[in-house]
Image (spheres, rainbow, N blue to C red):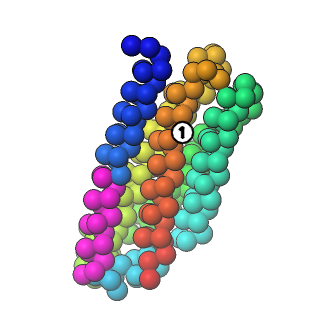
Amino acid sequence: MDNSSDATGVRIGMWLFLYSEIILFGGLFVLYAVYFHNYAADFVEGGRQLDRVIGALNTIILLISSFTVAASITAVRRQQKRWAQGLLAFSCGCGALFLVNKYLEWGAKFHHDLYPNSATLVDGPPGQNIFFGLYYVITGLHALHVIIGMSLLAWSLIGVSNGKVNQLHFGRLENSGLYWHLVDLIWIFVFPLFYLVL
């Protein structure tokens, strides 16, 4: 099998994997919709207790990182090695900043006793306990995907640095970029569901 066939097979495999990820988060979003239908007022109140500024900031961070990942692929194809390295390093930095913001946000919620089955939520409306349960599961799972995405980008950065990822062989970077774009796309749905719920 030639290199072109190998690249095509890897690309198809990546798309199938991304499809499975969409199914996973899609199922969680359907679960959210069912509970939102039953506890709309509690979900709205729960959303008011989240920091919209941090949520919006994280959205901007991921959108910028998605652009820089796409730009890094263009840079590799144009043989602009240093530019590609800088863009990938910047993208990884964006991912790290996203995780720091998420850690600070989670820490503040725990400090205010807002986590599943905490005394505050157990004694409060049942829908808020469900809301924060879904919030931690979905945002936690998304944060795990951010970490995986950063690892893939770092792997691609190493490949660019040692020449294994270049203008002729950039499948590793392309697939890492696809994964990163999926992570960003998922957040585009997570942000309004939790932070802008009305």
Answer above or below: position of 137 versus 113. Answer: above
Horizontal side, residue 117 vs residue 43: left or right: left
Percent position of residue 25, x then y: 34, 55
Q: Which residue is mark 1?
A: 177
Percent position of residue 56, x then y: 58, 66
Q: Residue furthest top?
A: 1
Horizontal side, residue 163 vs residue 15: left or right: right
Does the magenta segment cover residue 33? Answer: yes
- By secondary structure, the bulk of the magenta-drawn segment is best described as helix
Q: Classify mark 1: residues with Cα within 10 Å, few (<14), some (14-19) or many (20+).
A: many
Percent position of residue 73, x then y: 63, 34
Q: Residue flagged by tag 1: what amino acid is it?
A: Gly
Percent position of residue 191, x then y: 48, 66
Answer above or below: position of 91 versus 141. Answer: above
Does the magenta segment cover residue 7? Answer: no
Which residue occupies 55% across, 31% down?
Answer: 173
Q: Can I make out residue 182 in this image?
A: yes
Q: Can I make out residue 54 in this image?
A: no
Specify the quadrant that holds the N terminus: top left
Answer above or below: position of 68 versus 130. Answer: above
Quadrant of residue 113 within the rendered picture:
bottom left
Which residue occupies 39% across, 27% down?
Answer: 9
Horizontal side, residue 78 vs residue 135: left or right: right
Quadrant of residue 27 within the rendered picture:
bottom left
Which residue occupies 65% across, 52% down?
Answer: 64
Q: Which residues are magenta?
A: 23-38
| Tag 1 secondary structure | helix
In this view of the protein, which residue sits in the foreground, 165 or 152? 165
In this view of the protein, which residue sits in the foreground, 171 or 68? 171
